[in-house]
Amino acid sequence: MTNLTGKHNTKLALVVDDSAMQCKVLSVLLKEEGYRVFSANDGARGVKMYIKYKPDLVLMDINMPIMNGYEAARKIKSLSTGTSLCPLIFITSMDTDQAFIESIEAGGDGILVRPFSPEVFKAKIKSIQRISDLYQQVKTLQQEQQQDAELAEKLMSDVIESRNYALDKIGIVKKAAELFSGDIQLSALCPNGDVNILLGDFTGHGLRSSIGAIPLAETFRVMTKKGFTLLEVIGQVNQQLYDLLPPDLFLGAAFVTISSHDESAYIFNAGLPDVYVFSKQGDIKNQIESCHPPMGVLPYLLPDTKLTILPIKITDRVILISEAILKIK
Amino acid sequence: MTVKKVIAENSRNVSIEIEGRFDFSLHQQFREAYSSCNDSGTQFSLELSKATYMDSSALGMILLLKDHAEKVGGDVLINRPSEGVNKILEIAQFHRLMTIKV
């Protein structure tokens, strides 16, 4: 389990101020808040120490020799584009609008104007640390999500889709907005030489949308191989996904059997955009609309469920389109 | 993008209106709009005339609302979906699952 708050680690603070006295005062207060503290007496040295120690917090004076606070802040902020937000607070006795505006423009996350009481200082540090912790949490979650998406993608390409049949006859165009869009395509050979094809789109994206993919692929392949009719395969897929998935997860899917010996296509569209049959010349011969809620929504197929049966030639093309394509159009 | 909830005085008619994009980002707000409405026989009407977009997560959210309504012995009605949203509802054949008033 990742520690999101990082509370058990001592946090590092960097104090940049040309007055040794001020450094000392701020250091004592920060130590009371549980920080380990480093200090630098000018902006340039502050930037160097930032690079060396990667602190969790920077306190920055504005008027300093060699490099002033604004410039040092800009340098530091340009370096801290990684996973952690390093909050930077300007400490100054310049109580002007201009100082405030310039501080924020230089990348500062806050400004504290002297004189302030130790209590006010500590409160400011706490509030800024809270924001920084939230930022860290978001970053960590984002990374975990990315890993999940990569796992889902790998599962899909290595385990499931690599076992498809007749890959030389099925062209796939895949342009997903995200790493794993929830799309799945399957193909398998029937005992009589027909080919069953499925294009599906699971709700959502990432790992959550891929949990139904393995049982779906198994059912589709095993039943096809054993010679069940397409309608029987569809009925089983629907019932299985209904049993398996939570109510808000489902699969929009188009199923097609291409039968070369009787020159027919059997098509069923449940929740995908229209399926098209094109002639060799590129004319639309047929357009098959969705006629059933997506798989896994209802416990059983609706009683009037039937396949569309079309005569096709070997030169015709059947085009299945998933929702994801419409989303990014 | 907002979720607005209006409960009639008899508390058996709950209207939920979506403005703008209806997608996963509304998940929490949408659920909060109905989860405390447990009076038996509550009629939920989902106003979608101002929804400009809907994705499959939103369809999932509507199915969760339907589950909730059925649990309390009530019903869901989708009211006046905008053209684009209605297209999505048609593709998903949701009129086979609940009443949609165009």
Image: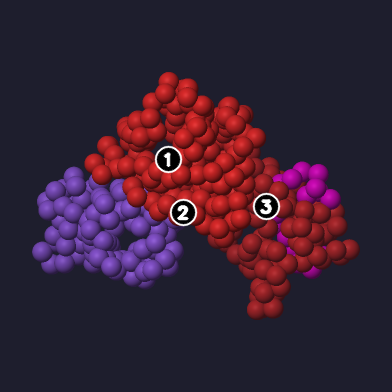
Chain colours: A red, B purple
Q: Residue furthest bottom?
A: A97
In this rendered view, identify the residue nearer to me: A195 or A133: A195
Highlighted range, magenta: A48-64
Earlier-in-chain disc, 2 versus 3 = 3
- Percent from the top left, x then y, of residue A318? 53, 46
Please give the chain letter of the residue carrying mark 2: A
The residue lying at 57 percent from left, 30 percent from top is: A164
Report the residue marked by disc 3.
A86
Depth-wise, is mark 2 or mark 3 nearer the camera? Answer: 2
- Percent from the top left, x then y, of residue B79? 27, 66
Report the residue marked by disc 1.
A266
Residue type at numbered disc 3: Cys
Mark 2 vs mark 3, CA separation in Å: 60 Å
Vertical placement of residue B70 versus A219, above or below: below
Residue type at numbered disc 2: Asn
- Badge number at residue A286: 2
* Element on which disc 2 rests: strand
